[in-house]
Amino acid sequence: MQVSNQINQGKAMQPPKAAQALTPEHLRRTCDPSTIKMPKTADIEMSQELIGQNRAINAIELAVSSHHRDFNVFVQGKPGSGRHSAIQRSLDQHAQNCAVPDDWVYVNNFDMPDRPRALRLPPGVGLELKHAMESLVDDLANDIPALFESEEYQAQRHAIERRYTEEHETAMSALNDKARAKDTAILRTPMGVAVAATRNGEVIEPKDYEALPAGEQEEIKATVTEIQQELEAIMADAPRSERAQRKEIRDLNAAMMTSGVEERIGEIASSFDGVTGIATYLEEVRADVADNADLFLMAAMERRNGNFPLATTKHYEDPRFQRYLVAVMVSHRRDDESGAPVVVEDFPTLANLIGRIEHSQEMGALLTDFTMIKPGALHRANGGFLVLDARQVLSEPFAWETLKRCLKSEAISIISVGEKLSLATTTSLSPDPIPLNVRVILIGERLLYHLLVKFDPDFSNLFKIQADFSDEIPISDINLSDYVHLIVSLGQGAGLLPLDEAATARLIEESARLAEDAERLTLNLGRLSDILKEADYQARTLAKTTIQAIDIDGSIGAAESRAGRIRDLSEEQILRGSKKIATDGDAIGQINALSVIDLGSTRFGQPSRITARVRMGAGKVVDIEREVELGGPLHSKGVMILSGFLSAHYAQDLPISLWASIAFEQSYGGVDGDSASAAELFALLSALSDLPIDQSYAVTGSVNQFGEVQAIGGVNEKIEGFFDICAARGLTGRQGVLIPLANVKNLALRDRVIDAVKRDKFRIIPLETIDQGISILTGRAAGRRDEQGAYAEDTVNGLVERKLQRFAEQRRKFGGPSDVASASGKEKTS
Amino acid sequence: MIKQARSRAPRVILGAICFADARPAIRLGAELAACIGGEIRAMLVEDDAVRRFAALPFAKALIQTKRASQPITPADMQKAFARDASIFQETLDQAARRAAVRWSFEQRRGQFIAEMRNAASAGDLILIGHQRTHDPRGDIVLFDPSDPVDDRLLDIGAHLGQALGQKLRLFVSSQTVDAVQARLNLWCERHPAMPRLVVSYQDAADPTAFLRYLSETRPSALVASVGSELPNDIDAILDIARCPIILANDKRTSRPEEV
């Protein structure tokens, strides 16, 4: 241990007492620089782990190590808590020990081109197959035309054609000779081929034929019929002969293709020997190439007169040959040392998650094929880890639903928004779904997590691990030591100047303020890093070699100053009297309450005047903010609680016959929270008792029905907000803030407040009860019930009870239900 | 383009007895007309022999689609002539438009070869159509045993060989081979954009070899001169070659030009 818990160890600190002003030691726990031992560089390496986040880190470890499909993890926590870096570090370490996942590619489905086939291949083989197929297409585009132009092919083809021609021609020639020898001729006529009898080489005249004796006519007729039958036989044989010829030529083509293509495809097949699926695919390619040799011949013919030599053209870019290409969805290096993929998708649209099918425009039509399938983050992360921002996924149309569908079905199916909404009528594809095995890490806010748990029944089933990053850690010896490591490593990681011990101590004090708890340190590393970076800038500006405490203070002050325009305007309104806030004197039914304005990057406190007016009525306390719908539910709850307090605390044997109104004066925006309920009660008690409240005080705290003052948030900003107004007007020594005792541990005030307290110019007084507060504010004892159950007359409580009794008596005099009705909130106040 | 020392545009006289014979010759005719810068005069001849045959009582024709001989009458034949003439004219129109050449068409009666000769004037090319039973893949055959070989025939042969992408097979006298080759080289130099011309030679002195070649192969076309000493008459050559025949009409043998 290099740092011991030396916060406030230099001086024994008394515990705070209710209704007594706090000492400066209570106002901010300080860290003694002399007790800090800065770590060596070698030790910094060890501090890569986040401190105080064991619960979240263990959850992430479980999620990334588990093989259960539904152990996806939702990482929740505030921005700047180091969630991303912790996840990245954890995933990187774990992924190294995981196997490199398989490659996935899409290839053409030669039977159904609209349903591309997915091939699972060993790591690295996807790209190798892609390049091999491109090379194959290039080779075939050169080889096939060359094969068909070769002397060998032409000679064989010519021989086949010649043989069939000769068969036919020889038969026809012989028939012609025979016909001539038998005084007949074969004629070509518009009605077909015919056999005619001839005399002296000329077709016989019909009248000459008629003049012939019957026997001779019969002889001629028989001869013609004979030749005719032979002619019919030859002609009938022609189609069969042509079919046989075509078949022989087809067989010749196939044989040529086989000799040229099969050898080349065989080379590829042997280079992927043993890889499941490739042999079958290559066989399909071989069959398709053999059937589509014309594609290669046509392409060769078209390119022969092109600008580039055939041999140097990238033929695989020709759309005709894309049927033989390989669309790589994901491919990993076989020797990839990073192991399983870790993919961070910053823009998780539907298409970026599951991939998309692109289209090309051709003659006004949108066309696509399997080569236009583009992978998404799920493809790239398959077999590994996918990190997504929950808000982004939920805000992208269809992204969340699609992610869930993929996780549930354990498969990636590509679908477009157009298809989902039935908007697209163009040609599309239905690629094989790719089996999915991915661990999804969603990073988001706690609110999102709880909303998803509540409203999405699938969420809890799919994201069974939650990793909740803490916002702060308790101060302990071990934690402080680790925290110093963390600060130093943050600086080193950002390339900043080293911090000296005082600067480190100052940053630790600021960390407690950021945690709003003197007993805890913030884990908002983003904010700490910002302070360090600006301090580094300031130190370098002054040519320092280390960051000093003054630089840390300068950094914090500058950041507050930059964000302080609204705060300054608010203060200015008060100081110029536009907004009425009294910081001295006294007034009945009027008190300074404190509120916090949160602007996201900064917040500050400001005083508000609360007033209360009372009269006889039907027991109603009107919250004016609520009536005009400027009050939130928590504020209304606070007002109702103080009604409960009044009812139970005073004149219990009489009906409450009070009509009271409470308002935040000059408040034109919404008011919420119950931190002003104590102030509202003080104003009401003042109005009921007719005792003035000392306006040197401001009050913050909520109250319960028993009159106990309870803790609130933003106590430091509230005190400083009132202090700054008082300081601007001149500190009187009476001024101060009443806070809940429970908030003392949250105090981490700025030096200017602590200095004033040290000089007795300002007071901070903790309260446990309303009675303590009203005593301080009015300078009159609150009073306790005596043995008869009555308050002493000159006490605050006595005066209040008497006023309530008087209201009850007055009301009794009026009597009747109509008066009760008239005492509703609708009557006008004077 | 073949230069003609004529004032009138040379013609390709394209004739056939039926459309089946005319069809393979129509593209050839268009190519030839474009080559000589002339026009096509086409005719369907109602051949006397066919008409006589149709009038015989036992006349039958083998209709290819039915693969059997059917009895025919003169009226049937007349209708068939009319039908073929119509298709012939229509197909010619399309081919001529593609080749950008002028054309005319007529239907005649008479003896086919005689009608063709009668229609031809000096310098015309006679193209006799003939039906093919197989796809045309054979050579362009040129027959001219004279010395010197008719340059016009060579130019026609070279043009068709290049335009149809077929080999040019020359049946010429062995003494003329060098001169023929020189002429063909000159042709190719003048037409560098045309595809390569493949030429082979055979001696025309052996008519038997010539006829056997015609009988056993499938020429795309036979090119000869009307005045050349073909070893047989045109009808017989047509029966043997069974391909379109192009005859270059010689001035000395031609009839006076028709008006």
Image (spheres, rainbow, N blue to C red):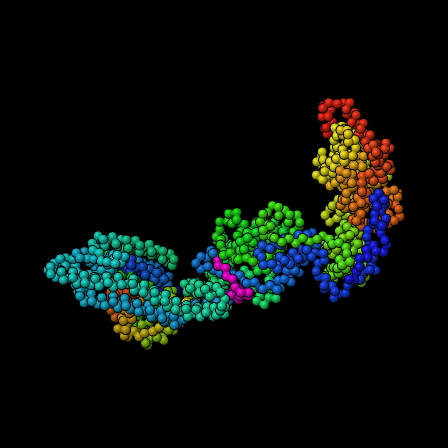
Quarter where residue A214 is shown: bottom left
Residue A405 vs B170, above or below: the answer is above
Could you tell me which residue is drawn at 89 percent across and 48 percent down?
A: A759
Magenta span includes A258:
no
Q: List x then y, in percent, for residue A61.
A: 64, 58
Q: Residue most toward the front? A: A787
Q: List x then y, in percent, for residue A259.
A: 41, 70
Q: List x then y, in percent, for residue A223.
A: 17, 63
User: Which of these two is toward me, A579 or B205?
Assistant: A579
Is the N terminus of chain A in the top left, top right, bottom left or bottom right quadrant? bottom right
Is the C terminus of chain A in the top left, top right, bottom left or bottom right quadrant? top right
Answer with left or right where residue A43 lies relative to residue A415: right
Is any atom of residue A767 visible in this view? yes
Residue A816 vs A712, above or below: the answer is above
Could you tell me which residue is drawn at 68 percent across and 52 percent down?
A: A77
User: Which of these two is toward me, A507 or A417?
Assistant: A507
Answer with left or right where residue A468 lies relative to residue A776: left
Answer with left or right where residue A294 lies relative to residue A686: left
User: Which of these two is toward me, A227 or A286?
Assistant: A286
Magenta span includes A129:
yes
Quarter where residue A487 is shown: bottom right
Could you tell me which residue is drawn at 81 percent across and 55 percent down?
A: A7
- Please report the bounds of the magenta region as a residue range: A116-131
Could you tell me which residue is drawn at 22 percent across and 66 percent down?
A: A175
